[in-house]
Image: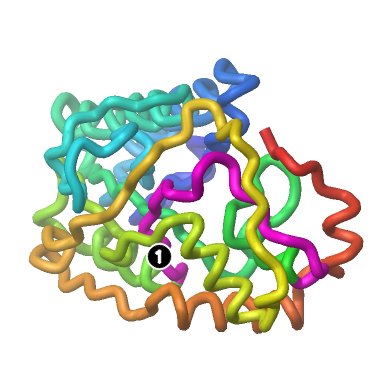
Amino acid sequence: MLEATQGVDVVLHMAVACVRASINDPLHVHDVNATGTLVPCQASLENGVRRFVYVSSTEVYGNARYAPVDEEHPLHPTNAYGASKAAGEMYALSAWRTHGLPACVVRLFNVYGPREHCQGVPAEVIPRFVMRVLAGESPVIFGTGQQTRDFTWVDDTVSGLVGAAACDALVGDIVHLGRGREVSVLDLAHLVLDKLGREDLSPVFLEDGRPGDVDHLWADTRKAERLFGYRPSVDIEDGLDRYIAWVREHGPEPLEWVQQQALRNW
C-alpha cells in the first residue's frame, strides 16, 4: 500500500466486501472494510497524500428514524457490513484529528449503472430485476416490497465524488451523495416491467427477507449542494432506460444468467 500511494495526490478508497457477504462471513467483511481502511490511511499519512476520501455507505444508519436522512442521523447499523463501514469512517476521521490526514467521508445511496454487479453475492436489485425480466421471468422480491431506497445514477455519483475530493471545507466532515428521491422495491419492480414491456408478468414475493435488511433510506443532499454544488440530474426512469440499453448491448445472455444465478444471493 505504501507503494500504491506514493506520489498520489488524492485517494478515493472504495474497496469493499459487500453487505450480503457480511451475513455469512462477518470476519472477512471486517478485515476488508475496517482493517482494509486503516492500512491505506496509514500509507496515505506516510506518503503525504493531500486528500483521503473514504467512500462509505448508508448502511451505517440501519433503519432510518426519519426521512430524508441527513448526516446527523444516529448510527445504528443492523448488519456487520454497516458496522464495518462505520469503523472505517472512524479510522479515516481519527487519522485527520490525530495525525492531520486531510480525510473526509462520503456516504453513498444505492449507486447503479453500467457494469454494476449482476452475478453472485455482489449482485444488486436493479441488475437482478432487469436480467430476470429480460429472460421472461418475474422479478423476485424478498419481504413486502415496501422497503425503500434512493437509487443514484453512477454519473451523478462520480460528479459528487470529484466535488467532494476537491472541497477543502469537507476535510474532517461527512456528506451524502444520493438522488434525493425515495423509491420502493415494489415500485422499482413495476418500473422495470413497464420499461421492458412485460405487463404480463407480476412480481413474485418471498416472505423471508434478507437478514439485517434496512427498511427505508432516502438522502438529504443539501449539504453536498451547499459545499460543492452537487446537483444529481438522472431520475430512476431515465436511469433505467440507460441501464437497460447498456445491458442489451454489453450484458450477459439473460436466459443463461437465470440458469446460473441462485434465487437468493446471500
Give the residue drawn at x 9%, y 55%: 169
Q: Local crowd at mark 1 within 10 Å, few (<14), some, or many (≥20)?
A: many
Q: Quadrant of residue 17?
A: top right
Q: Is residue 76 above or below residue 205?
A: above
| Residue name at image x 19 percent, y 56 percent | 220
| Residue 108 makes an appearance in the image | yes
**Residue at figure coordinates x 56%, y 19% from the top left:** 26
Q: Between residue 218 and residue 53, name the one nearer to us.
A: 218
The percent coordinates of residue 30 (x first, y second) are: 50, 22
Give coordinates of residue 209: x percent, y percent: 56, 34
Residue 162 % position (x, y): 32, 66
- The reply to whether the magenta stretch includes residue 222 is no
Helix, strand or loop at label 1? It is strand
Name the foreground residue: 11 vs 252: 252
| Image quadrant where one finds the C terminus | top right
| Amino acid residing under circle 1 | Thr
Residue interval drawn in magenta: 134-154
266 vs 11, left or right, is right
Q: Residue at x 73, y 68 (%)?
A: 133
Task: Specify whether residue 100 is in view.
Answer: no
225 vs 30, left or right, is left
Outermost residue, top side: 27
Query: In front: 28, or 147?
Result: 147
> Residue 93 sits in which quadrant?
top left
